[in-house]
Image (cartoon, coloured by chain):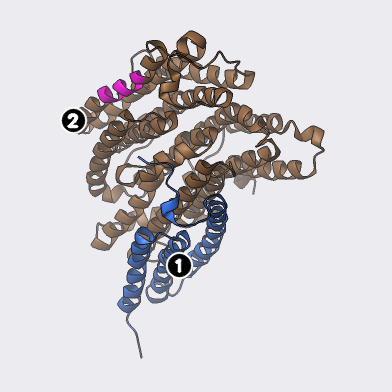
Amino acid sequence: MDIPMSFYLLVSFVMFFAGVFGFITRKNMIAMLMSLELILNSVNINFVVFNRFLFPEQMEGMFFTLFIIGVAAAETAVAIAIIINVFRSVNNISADDIQKMKY
Amino acid sequence: MNDLVQLMRPEMLLLAQVVFLLLFDLFAPDRARRHTDAVACALFLASIAVGFLPSTTGEAFGGMFTVTAMTQVVKNVLSIGLLLVFLQSRVWLSDERTSFKKAEFYILTLSTLLGMNLMISAGHFLLFYLGLELASLPLTTLVAYNKYSDESIEAGAKFVLIAAFSSGMMLFGISLFYGAAGADGLYFDVLSSRLAATPLQLLALVFFLSGVAFKISLVPFHLWTADVYQGAPTSVTAFLSVVSKGAAVFALMFLSFRLFAPLFEYWQYVVWALVVLTITIGNLFAMRQDNMKRFLAFSSISQAGYILLGMIAGTPLAMSSVVYYLLVYLVSNLGIFAVVSILENNSGKVHISDYRGLYRTNPYLSVVLMLFLFSLGGIPPFAGFFSKFFVFMAAADQGFYVLDFIALINTVISLYYYLLVVKAMFIADSENPIPTLHTDSWSRLCLTLCLVGTLFFGVFSGIYAFLSSGAWGL
């Protein structure tokens, strides 16, 4: 049974926009990070699917995905470190509580 | 192999410095570690000097890494900017709250510069992405460098989330390019020959450009800029607003000239709107700021608009005028930041209202600051006038008269708020002005270099001729 490529792309587009929506609406910074992961993983799905269906003779998309996974881990580590620091200073990780600077 | 060393000379030198400083900080005795800043600056100065030696051009790693005459020039410009940041950050780093981790500042900024160099030389989207991340991840830690200051933490949190979000947008665009372009389509040269403005490619262009626009803080994507610039330590703000923004602009410039050439007419529409929005909104918000760092944030947003105005034409003239604009912007803006950080380090004051009566107590500092502000505003004898002139000329050359007119009106608006600072220093009186300060020799050297730059880059036409010799168009 063959699943056409557009079905995979549907999943990745829904994931991407769910991530964007979540990033904008969530107040908890850990939830915002999770939304970012959704965005990055939708990109990964895109790369893998394009590679598998369109250009199966080369591994370019797969390699790109591996690099994205690695960099995303580093990014998350830095973000979590900063969020922990935020927690130490205001005892909360809600985006509503970091609003000393505005306008 | 020899070729590779020649081509990647700046990157390899930067990597060697990062590793050396890391080991130096770990193993050197305390007596030697007190001179970390002298060691770091001396090494970096040496590597800049090597950067000016003649070098080869060409490609490495099968076209992933490309070097042209212009990329070399641009890398040197960014390195000089970083050196000026080093000079002005010394007082802040010697403070007892930061002095134990000052080597980290040098390591992180140098690795950021390494990432920027990779991004500028990239010939493949993978290297571009890795360079971009290497340039933005250490920066987030630098923004949150003052671990116990609430504002620095807040700025760090905002910056890390926005940086990750914008690279996510950009990556989504890249993945669509990959699907649209075919095998090997991630190489810029291959992709460029296959771009034909299909709907998928235009969608990819939109996502990609909005990701990059976050990094340059163009207007609909600028909301993080003011908060991050205000919260970050002043030297880091200087680095962010000049070197980091400059690198992103250069990368976008090379991309738009090399890669997006077939989509140029679509690209121009987008950039037209971005320029108008960026210049106008940056200017309007700058007028109502009192915090000097926030003020400079909005001023740098509107300056980014002028840079983009130069880019819209897509001719060799446009490329050289953009590089020239950034060079001039670099010296004037870093000069302003040097004065701001001298005042902040010695008296803790960063508000424009605190600058009242500054001329009476610190005449030299206020005159120097005035000259830099005039240069940013574009008043004739200074370099800022000539850089604005070339940018306007490049756009007018391709018939963007309306755009030039809008930008011209905005130049007048920007003069108003630059002069607000001058007025506070020279005309307004204050009960308790900032007391007379002693300026340390490193900051003085930085100010002198910036001043020489603002005074002579405009008058001395050899620089512009040199820049335009390496430029290429569409």
Q: Which image quarter holds the C terminus of chain A?
A: top left
Q: Determine the residue positioned at 39% across, 30% down.
A: B295
Kind of element beneath mark 2:
helix
Kind of element beneath mark 1:
helix
Tag 1 and tag 2, C-beta contact below 8 Å: no
Q: Position of residue B347 (x, y in %)?
A: 55, 23
Residue B401: give its label.
Answer: 2
Q: Decide: is B278 above or below B124.
A: above
Say if residue B383 shows up in the picture. yes
Look at the image and give the residue range highlighted in magenta.
Answer: B411-420
Looking at the colours in the rendered structure, which chain would you say is drawn in blue?
A
Near mark 1 (Cα within 10 A), the count class, few <14, some 14-19 or many ≥20, is many
In this view, the residue farthest toward the bottom is A1
Q: Position of residue A80 (x, y in %)?
A: 55, 58
Q: Position of residue B63 (x, y in %)?
A: 49, 53
Say if residue B460 shows up in the picture. no
Residue A61: give its label.
Answer: 1
In this view, the residue farthest toward the left is B402
Give chain B's shade: brown
Label count reads 2
- Asked where in the image residue B283 lies, by quadrant, the reply is top left
Q: Position of residue B236 (x, y in %)?
A: 53, 36
Q: Decide: is B14 above or below B378.
A: below
Q: Determine the residue positioned at 56% across, 22% down.
A: B446
